[in-house]
């Protein structure tokens, strides 16, 4: 299963430094939820891109003889997990948007 999704909670807790607590509905108090969600999505996308670039760099190093196959396999597997997590998050966001757009106002 995708273990990268657990990192979202770490990102939220790290980015929400000004959070003073949680409201009864579970929403953080003391921060703008729209900005924190956008920052979280942006951070996850940046980390995914970085992981993919790292895997590419390690693969090139292996072709040059500077990295062993274990390092390449680890980097590629990490990149694959990050990409799968990003695609899953994207799919959930698109599904939520489509459900909201179908709602009667």
Image (cartoon, rainbow, N blue to C red):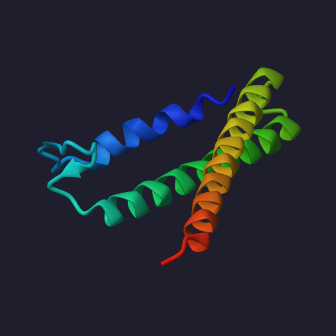
**Observer-nearest of 59 and 20:** 20
State the residue at coordinates (15%, 51%): 18
View extreme (top): residue: 70
Residue positioned most to the left: 20
Q: Quadrant of residue 36?
A: bottom left
- Picture coordinates of residue 6 (x, y %)? 50, 32
Residue 72: quarter of image: top right
In what quadrant of the picture does the N terminus appear? top right
Q: Who's the residue at 68% across and 33% down the image?
A: 78
Query: Residue placed at 61% from the left, 50% from the top?
Result: 89
Q: Position of residue 76 (x, y in %)?
A: 76, 35
Query: Which corner quadrant of the image does residue 24 belong to?
Result: top left
Q: Looking at the picture, tell me which residue is in the foreground, 17 or 100.
A: 100
Residue drawn at point x = 78 percent, y = 21 percent: 70
Residue 13 x/y as whole percent: 30, 40
In the picture, measured across the screen, residue 21 lies left or right of residue 92, that is left
Question: In the rendering, at what x and y percent does residue 7 appear?
Answer: 48, 35
Viewer-proximal residue, 66 or 6? 6
| Left or right of residue 18: residue 95 | right
């Amino acid at each position: 299963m995708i273990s990268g999704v657990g990192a979202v909670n770490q990102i939220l807790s790290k980015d929400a430094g000004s959070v003073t607590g949680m409201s009864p509905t579970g929403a953080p108090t003391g921060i703008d939820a729209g900005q924190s969600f956008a920052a979280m999505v942006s951070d996850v996308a940046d980390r995914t891109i970085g992981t993919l670039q790292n895997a590419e760099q390690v693969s090139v190093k292996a072709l040059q003889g500077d990295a062993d196959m274990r390092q390449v396999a680890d980097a590629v597997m990490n990149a694959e997990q990050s990409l799968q997590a990003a695609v899953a998050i994207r799919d959930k966001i698109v599904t939520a948007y489509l459900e909201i757009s179908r709602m009667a106002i």
